[in-house]
Image (cartoon, helix red, strand yellow):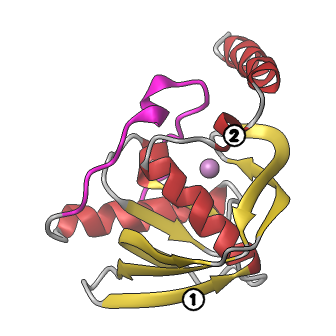
Amino acid sequence: MALLNILCYPDPRLHTVATPVKEIVNETLTLIENMIETMYESNGIGLAATQVDVHQRIIVLDVSDERNSPMVLINPEIIWTHPDRVKGEEGCLSVPNTYDGVERSIEVKVKAMGKAGELQEIHAKELLAVCIQHEMDHLLGKVFVDYLSPLKRNRIKTKMLKLQRENSH
Ligand code: NI
């Protein structure tokens, strides 16, 4: 297993639209293992392949307190969304130390393949519902800060670029 490099906002590669996985091959399974390890190592609750610069429709999640129940969603599709939406604080491994309010559906039903290619249907509520919507946005090239006002977004962009300059020295 290996830790993967996570792209940081405003890296333009985060805006790439991922393509569906056609076939689950050994490389796909290695990628998934590495994504799970990277998510745990970074204390994240979700990670999309887009964030590690692989533009395939794969996300991994774990919203459990014990951090021992990783979920793998390949080619996820939202098949139902609850009409009620609520605004909650979100953060992202690609936008470190930045949190802001984003409105999401309170429940979603998702259809996806697991890593053995099995079809799964998940009725997600609360944190899992938010996390799935957030990660699925990444697969469409969307980062949560894209929902914020241009003013806030620019402030975050400036802060991130400054941090990245400092870290590269
Ligand atoms: Ni994210």
* Residue 35: percent from left, percent from top: 47, 60
Q: Which residue is mark 2?
A: 147
Q: Amino acid at mark 1?
A: His
**As drawn, is 155 to the left or to the right of 133?**
right
Q: Does 2 appear in magenta?
A: yes
* Residue 38: percent from left, percent from top: 55, 57
- Mark positioned earlier in the residue sequence (1 or 2): 1
Q: Amino acid at mark 2?
A: Tyr
Asked if 1 appears above or below 110 in the picture, the reply is: above
Q: Does 24 appear in magenta?
A: no
Establish whether ligand 1 lies closer than 8 Å to the Cβ of label 1.
no
**As drawn, is 56 to the left or to the right of 83?**
left
Q: Secondary structure at mark 1?
A: strand
Q: Quadrant of the N terminus?
A: bottom left
Q: Along the line of sight, which residue is nearer the eye, 112 or 52? A: 112
Q: Which residues are magenta?
A: 1-21
Q: Residue at x 74, y 25 (%)?
A: 153
Report which quarter residue 82 is drawn in: bottom right
Please tell me the numbered disc located at residue 123: 1
Q: Is residue 4 visible?
A: no
